[in-house]
Amino acid sequence: MYAVAILGFGVVGSGVAEVLDKNADRITQGASRELSLKYIVDVREFPDSPYKDLIIKDFSVVENDPDVRVVVETIGGVGVAQEFTRRALAAGKSVVTSNKELVAKFGCELLQIAKDKGVNYLFEASVGGGIPILRPITQCLAANKITEIYGILNGTTNYILTSMIKRGASFDDALAEAQAKGYAEANPTSDVDGIDACRKISILADLSFGRHMDPDWVKTVGIRTVTAEDVSYAAENGFKIKLLGRAVLNEDGRIFAYVAPHLVPEENLLAGVEGVNNGIVVRGNAIGDVMFYGAGAGKLPTASAVVADVIDAAKHEHARKLVSWDEGDVSMMRDSAELESRWYVRTGEKQYITPSAQSKSSIDASLAGVEVLTLFRVLD
Amino acid sequence: MYAVAILGFGVVGSGVAEVLDKNADRITQGASRELSLKYIVDVREFPDSPYKDLIIKDFSVVENDPDVRVVVETIGGVGVAQEFTRRALAAGKSVVTSNKELVAKFGCELLQIAKDKGVNYLFEASVGGGIPILRPITQCLAANKITEIYGILNGTTNYILTSMIKRGASFDDALAEAQAKGYAEANPTSDVDGIDACRKISILADLSFGRHMDPDWVKTVGIRTVTAEDVSYAAENGFKIKLLGRAVLNEDGRIFAYVAPHLVPEENLLAGVEGVNNGIVVRGNAIGDVMFYGAGAGKLPTASAVVADVIDAAKHEHARKLVSWDEGDVSMMRDSAELESRWYVRTGEKQYITPSAQSKSSIDASLAGVEVLTLFRVLD
């Protein structure tokens, strides 16, 4: 028996159960064996769920059941999720997750434990929801030296910005609408302040550049300061405002990484990425630019990425996937203020885009004494 | 020693040699072993090539050398390429190729030979040049039932159409320009008549739907009939004309597949795919729509996809990749004329888009007796 256990029966966890059922034939074919969902671990009660007979409260049942070969961690956060992940790996079970916070912070260590135990730790769903991105980077682009990766990594903020662009809404109105529609949390900080995008660009940089990049090292600015005035100036000049996470490999081997709003030219495909969708661009020294696009969140899209990893873990039970990265330290980072670009500037008196690329230090110096209301990079 | 041989030292073959050299460190790391290029088989002489010492004329040297574990077939066509592929697989070597004609026509059989021999037959570079697409379909989207796949699959025709859109050029002028720039062959038939796109949509359908779809079963129309008038009418109404390959799984399990020019709405990301780039959309029952974008051809992009497969073959020498599809027959196809869509019609007197979706048979009937100059589908 090849059994699967789900930890955390929230949106993604319940989506995983649903996809395992709905597409069982295709999954069996892909994994070359039948997978059976044996346990769902959650402290809550779900008396009306069709899966209520599988729900247990005690993780150690999963940990000690040799039938369970893959554990799906959809708890989130770095507390109990981390503990259960470590214990599951230590018990020789592969772990699949959508938990970007845990992977961004502790992925390097958890991959090492998986390697020592000869099992897999897979997390395609942690970036870009259901969009295939991590596996393409590690496998399909393996013959490339990746020099840059950037994109729209957070669906909530893209939904808000799209509303501001299309309806001329203020940030507050657009946020309220996103909350009403369930696209933003009551406490929207992790989305609108760029924290979620920061975790995702960190994971993308880990895989692209081969070293752990701690999210704490990534200068992160969200979208609270974007105004309807900025949006309309951008539109008049052929740009759309998008929140981008970006990591650039410098010639000296160090990395510029940050999250911030950008003016994206309309002819760039990312400008056409609307609503809750994500778009991620990878630049390689042989392939040039490739872009991956799709639903960056949502129950079934994210669950389908989790289940693809479950299939992969089942298929590769005796041939561990070789995904890993080295430890890193802050000296590998360059100050993103030194990365040159054109800038969009709004002062009390005027709005303009600088004619040439310059560092943030340089534009700051040139604006000394001026009251700057908005200062965003232009993506060229 | 883990040696590689390249068959055919043309554009892609020489690009493979270049990428193996240029990114050797990353490739060694990815494959967890050093790969060495041992032979290049070509009947021509290359006295000035840095690889001239590796060039041999006799394929049987490769066939009989146990050091050679992976053979890269970049000859093209279904003649000698097919023979050497069969012999290499029979000799227990993995084969990697960019040869869409061979894969589209004989992929099913060649995969069976590879399976019997416990080796890999990989062909990521056969569709979309360097864009990761085949592996994402088979692995990352493995938890989805794929219901439709379509896209801009040929860079040459997209370059020509982009020139027509941007410069108002006629088809003949745009073709001549593409030929002058090296983007189109002196004999452009395989591109402009949609044959190349037909092979690619066939391979995509094979992988998406699990059965061999012969390119001969795919109704294929190219771009020779697109006029500047069509392009400008499209632009005035918010569309761009693009050549799409498309395969749709019908509810009865049969497949609609065809290649034809379409009017693509400007808000669709495919409308923004310009020049020689490709964009491919996959629709899954859990993920929704995902799009893959990048350079669809070119020496280094294509070579980087070939080398990624070489890395994968090296990494999985003892764990064959489980890619295959079943045999198919023409009864699995539905007549694409029955697939409904809106239509763009140009007669001697007027141009218009039909208000509602209908089959080709239906629009043909309604136009009986009218001289129809252009009839293209609208992608909705």
Image (cartoon, coloured by chain):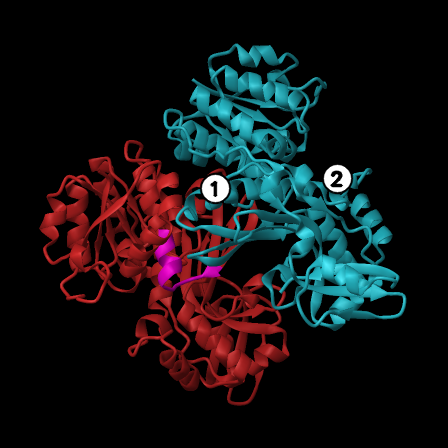
Chain colours: A cyan, B red
Give the secondary structure at mark 1: helix
Q: Amino acid at mark 2?
A: Ser
Residue drawn at (44%, 33%) of the image = A312
Q: Are marks 2 and 1 in contact (CB under 8 Å)?
A: no
**Image position, residue B226 (x, y; %):** 46, 80
The magenta stretch spans residue B303: yes
Pointer 2 residue: A190
**Image position, residue A13 (x, y; %):** 62, 29
Pointer 1 residue: A135
Is A352 or B217 nearer to us in this picture?
A352
**Image position, residue A45 (x, y; %):** 72, 18
The stretch of residues the image draws in magenta is: B294-305
Q: Chain of mark 2?
A: A
Callout 2 and callout 1 share a chain: yes
* Residue B111 against residue B101 in the figure, above or below: above
**Image position, residue B187 (x, y; %):** 29, 77
Q: Between marks 2 and 1, how big is the CA–CA gap?
A: 25 Å
